[in-house]
Amino acid sequence: MTDFSSLSFLIVDDVSAVREFMRQSLNHLGAVDVYEASNGQMAIEKYSSNFPDVVFLDIELPDTDGLSILKKIKAIKSDAFVVMISAYSSVDNVKSTIADGASGFIVKPFSPQKITTILKKYPR
């Protein structure tokens, strides 16, 4: 098993059950620093104050869309490692998020194995 205890994370999703599942999965992988946000404004505030290594970002948020948050995060830190999350994995969704700088894309519902697989792409 890969240990991700040295990385910090930000989970951005408006569904608390998704954030909780992701937090538990990351904790199981050794993560200690896990921040959460339920909307876009909170995501930018948490990112700006904590600069997490990895961001899991839902495409659909109550106050904005994940693509605009992705662009704001990339403006703050151009090499930010942002993984987009969505229940809708259309080819357009995946292409546009990757084109805008996302490091990966996972579809809900996802497994701890999918989280591990995407984290293995993190540049160390």
Image (spheres, rainbow, N blue to C red):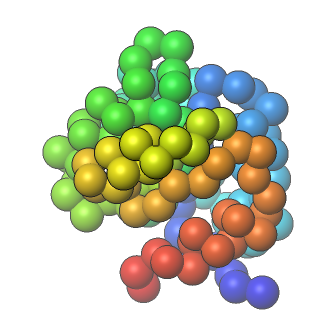
Residue 38 appears in the rendering: yes
Instruction: Tell me which residue sits at (25%, 37%) in the image.
Output: 72
Front in this rendered view, residue 41 or 18: 18
In percent of the image, x 74 and y 37: which residue is there?
18
Q: Is residue 108 above or below residue 5?
A: above
Residue at 79% x, 63% y: name it. 112
Nearer to me, 58 or 45 = 58
Instruction: Look at the picture and state if 6 lies above or below 98.
Output: below
In the picture, measured across the screen, residue 79 lies left or right of residue 55, that is left
User: Residue 77's quadrant in the figure?
Assistant: bottom left
Where's residue 103, x and y in %?
Answer: 40, 62
Residue for point 80% across, 58% down = 111
Q: Is residue 67 above or below residue 10?
A: above
Measuring from the top left, give residue 38's x and y in whole percent.
58, 25
Split into 4 quadrants, where in the image is the N terminus?
Answer: bottom right
Residue 13 lies, in percent from the top left, at: 60, 32
User: Going by the image, does 54 lie left or right of 51?
Assistant: right
Q: Position of residue 120 (x, y in %)?
A: 57, 79
